[in-house]
Amino acid sequence: MKRRPEPELMDTEEQAQAYAEADFSDSNSLFMRLLARQARGGLPGSAALDLGCGPADIVLRLLRTYPRLHCDALDGAATMLERARAILEDAADLDGRWQLVHDRLPSSRLAERRYDLILSNSLLHHLHDPQVLWRTVRAHANPDALVLVMDLLRPPSAGWAEALVETYVANAPEVLRSDFRNSLFAAYEPREVVEQLAEAGLEDLEVGVVSDRHLAVWGRLPG
């Protein structure tokens, strides 16, 4: 199925509220399991970067799972970051171990910062130029940094996409149903992601299908 790009930002109040209230526990739990598998030998340091953090559920889970980490969380949608701030400020146990960054990629606000762990969940399919993500990974990763990027997987047909919509968001608000459908059409195939990594000089990272609707990119960069 041919890729159909969608808008890069989800910045309406309706979208922010719907995503903050939605139950993404299955996919976010999968993301955290993938991270735990890659981090079995220990995290390489304490500085993390979450690209496209949305309402920050991954940031919340990350900091509670790994209490040594500090996480910078970037998103281009101000409404999403408002929800993220409310959620993170309400979590007293996080002890100020996070910072929100309002910007799009490539981000000048990250300046010369370097990170030991770079994460992204469901950002890649929004990007009209996927290289802005991979160049950011290269520019801001410390030697031996751990990388985990998970995203939707483009199904082979429109009918398959519609079946996924009915399976996973049948009872969700229409804004979520529409966004999920559009995101499936906008997602990349594994071979396309492999080509993106080769272009970016990130061949050390692996690509795999991790669910019926997700692919992931993972690995450690050279030391």
Image (cartoon, rainbow, N blue to C red):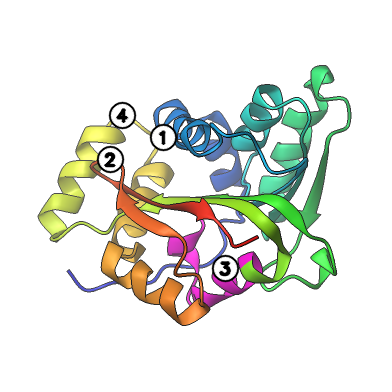
SS majority, magenta: helix
Going from N to C along the chain, the mark reached first, 3 or 1, is 1
Q: Residue at x 85, y 68 (%)?
A: 112
Q: Which residue is mark 1?
A: 27
Q: Which residue is mark 4?
A: 171
* Quarter of the image where one finds residue 105: bottom right
Residue 209 seen in this snapshot? yes
Mark-to-mark CA distance, 4 and 3: 32 Å
Residue 38 in the image: state x and y as whole percent: 50, 39
Going from N to C along the chain, the mark reached first, 4 or 3, is 3
From the viewer's side, name the closer residue of 88 and 179: 88
Tag 2 and tag 1, C-beta contact below 8 Å: yes
Residue 106 in the image: state x and y as whole percent: 68, 74
Residue 138 in the image: state x and y as whole percent: 63, 69
The amino acid beneath tag 2 is Ser
Going from N to C along the chain, the mark reached first, 1 or 4, is 1
Q: Is residue 211 left or right of residue 5?
A: left
Residue 37 numbered mark, or none: none
Magenta range: 123-137
Q: Which residue is mark 3?
A: 133
How crowded pointer 3 is (Cα within 10 Å; few <14, some 14-19, many 20+) is rated as: many
Tag 4 and tag 3, C-beta contact below 8 Å: no
Callout in the foreground (2, 4): 2
Mark-to-mark CA distance, 2 and 4: 21 Å
The amino acid beneath tag 3 is Leu
Rendered-image quadrant of the N terminus: bottom left
Q: SS of the residue at dot 1?
A: helix
Q: Residue at x 34, y 58 (%)?
A: 182
From the viewer's side, name the closer residue of 134 and 145: 145
Q: SS of the residue at dot 4?
A: loop
Residue 100 in the image: state x and y as whole percent: 79, 48
Q: Which residue is mark 2?
A: 211
